[in-house]
Image (spheres, rainbow, N blue to C red):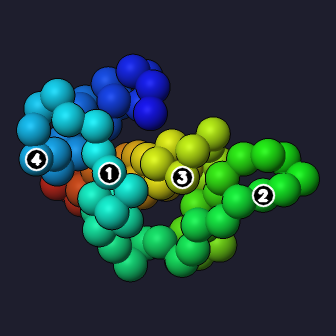
Amino acid sequence: MNAQFLAQLKLANFPQRDEDAVPTCAELVTACGRELEKVEWERTTSEWTAYSAAGSPYSGQTPEDALANLWLATHRQFTHESAYVSDA
């Protein structure tokens, strides 16, 4: 996982065991929870793809990158929805 993903996860308050630790695949799967449908290697694009429960694809060079993309996307959505509800 590259520094960009780590910085984005930190800014989004990803639940980490240690501030400088790189999240494991298992930690990312757990954090994604029910939003995660599956993760698979895409032979045609040579990338990993994590699919959300809604079917949306999130790609990355590693399974961790794909899972981080999924978590960030769903976390941003929930954060945005929470902010909208609290403003109402």
Query: Residue at position x 28%, y 37% from top?
Result: 22
Quick check: 54 left or right of 85?
right
For the residues labelled 4 and 1, the Cα–Cα distance comes to 10 Å
Q: Earlier in the sequence, mark 3 or mark 1?
A: 1
For the residues labelled 4 and 3, the Cα–Cα distance comes to 19 Å
Q: Residues within 10 Å of mark 1 (few under 14, many from 20)?
A: few
Q: Which label number is shown at residue 17? A: 4
Q: Which residue is mark 1?
A: 24
The amino acid marked with disc number 2 is Glu
Question: In x, y percent, where is residue 12?
Answer: 26, 38
59 relative to 33, above or below: above
Q: Residues within 10 Å of mark 3 (few under 14, many from 20)?
A: many
Query: Residue at position x 10%, y 38% from top?
Result: 18
Q: Which residue is mark 3?
A: 63
Q: Earlier in the sequence, mark 4 or mark 3?
A: 4
Question: In x, y percent, where is residue 44?
Answer: 89, 53
Query: Residue at position x 33%, y 63% from top?
Result: 26
Q: Secondary structure at mark 3?
A: helix
